[in-house]
Image (spheres, rainbow, N blue to C red):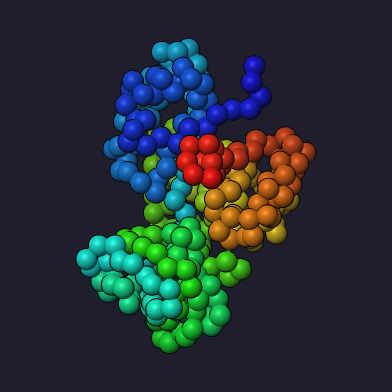
């Protein structure tokens, strides 16, 4: 029996009953439902199809529900994607305004309080980089360092900044209660920063009368600092290499993963190595 398991993230191209049967036949052990996208109705159909495909093959296929987490994102752009040119000024505001090449809103109301002059903000997993030049009221003015195209709801990262976001958003709480009613097998908590982040998850589970194992996603420098305590507190670990590569120097990512593997083995906890694993084999390297 394989000790290593295969986790497959399901999307529109892999959610039909036929596609799921093929994935199960190819060795899928865990089906990951990403709650950053899709409706409950969509995910419920996929969940039922995964269970049916596993039963048909005589195999147990687990369902992992991955909570979105308090992701910091841009708002909407009035006329679609815009190109930010290197050297240009670009302002990010907590005001609810339509975006353009000069100004865009953010979902994170605490940004002006956390950002400092000289901080770098990475947009869309580092494809675009800006540097803070001024903070005034609800507006953070930046200068574009690495230009590129940005569009609706792209993520923001502030490497090295301990942002003051809660462990779970209101959406995450609703999603968790839904996943518990669905009878998923595993829950993944995004943007974990400390072992205490599991407490709110367990509180909600206890309110619902269901306890499921919880995986901590290691995506932030604070999680790396608290890694040993997190491994002890959670039921499993996911090293999100792509997100870590945005927050940390790339050379540190494999070292973090190696340390996480050692700690997880010591505690007999499962570890998932996620993202950026096979990209060089299917595209330009």
The reply to whether residue 28 is in sight is: yes
Q: Residue at left 55%, top 29%?
A: 6
Q: Nearer the viewer, residue 19 or 31?
A: 19
Q: Residue furthest left?
A: 79
Q: Residue at left 25%, top 71%?
A: 98
Q: Quadrant of the N terminus?
A: top right
Q: As displayed, is residue 142 above or below residue 279?
A: below
Q: Residue at left 45%, top 13%?
A: 57
Q: How many marks?
A: 0
Which of the 4 image quadrants contains residue 162?
Answer: bottom right
Locate residue 171, reporting x and y percent: 39, 54
Q: Residue at left 51%, top 41%?
A: 279
The reply to whether residue 51 is in sight is: no
Q: Nearer the viewer, residue 47 or 104?
A: 104
Q: As displayed, is residue 51 above or below residue 104?
A: above
Locate residue 178, reporting x and y percent: 39, 42
Locate residue 89, reporting x and y percent: 39, 80
Q: Is residue 231 left or right of residue 140?
A: right
Locate residue 75, reporting x and y percent: 33, 65
Q: Nearer the viewer, residue 280 or 225?
A: 280
Which of the 4 image quadrants contains residue 277?
Answer: top right
């Amino acid at each position: 029996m394989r000790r290593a398991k295969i986790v497959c993230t399901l999307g529109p191209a892999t959610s039909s009953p036929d596609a799921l049967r093929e994935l199960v036949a190819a060795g899928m052990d865990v089906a990951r439902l990403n709650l950053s996208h899709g409706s409950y109705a969509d995910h419920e159909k996929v969940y039922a199809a995964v269970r049916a495909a596993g039963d048909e093959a005589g195999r147990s296929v687990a369902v992992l529900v991955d909570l979105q987490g308090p992701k910091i994102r841009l708002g909407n752009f009035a006329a679609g994607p815009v190109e930010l040119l290197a050297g240009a000024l670009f302002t990010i505001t907590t005001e609810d305004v339509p975006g353009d090449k000069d100004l865009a809103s953010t979902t994170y109301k605490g940004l002006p309080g956390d950002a400092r002059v000289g901080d770098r903000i990475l947009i869309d997993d580092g494809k675009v980089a800006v540097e803070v030049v001024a903070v005034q009221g609800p507006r953070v003015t930046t200068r574009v360092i690495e230009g590129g195209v940005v569009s609706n709801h792209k993520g923001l990262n502030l490497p090295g900044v301990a942002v003051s976001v809660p462990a779970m958003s209101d959406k995450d709480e609703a999603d968790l209660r839904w996943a518990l009613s669905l009878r998923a097998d595993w829950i993944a908590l995004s943007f974990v920063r400390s072992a205490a982040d599991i407490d709110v998850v367990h509180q909600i589970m206890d309110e619902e009368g269901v306890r499921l194992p919880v995986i901590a996603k290691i995506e932030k420098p604070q999680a790396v600092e608290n890694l040993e305590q997190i491994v002890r507190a959670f039921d499993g670990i996911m090293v999100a290499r792509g997100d870590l590569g945005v927050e940390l120097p790339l050379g540190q990512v494999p070292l973090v993963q190696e340390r996480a593997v050692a700690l997880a083995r010591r505690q007999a906890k499962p570890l998932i190595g996620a993202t950026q694993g096979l990209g060089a084999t299917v595209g330009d390297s």
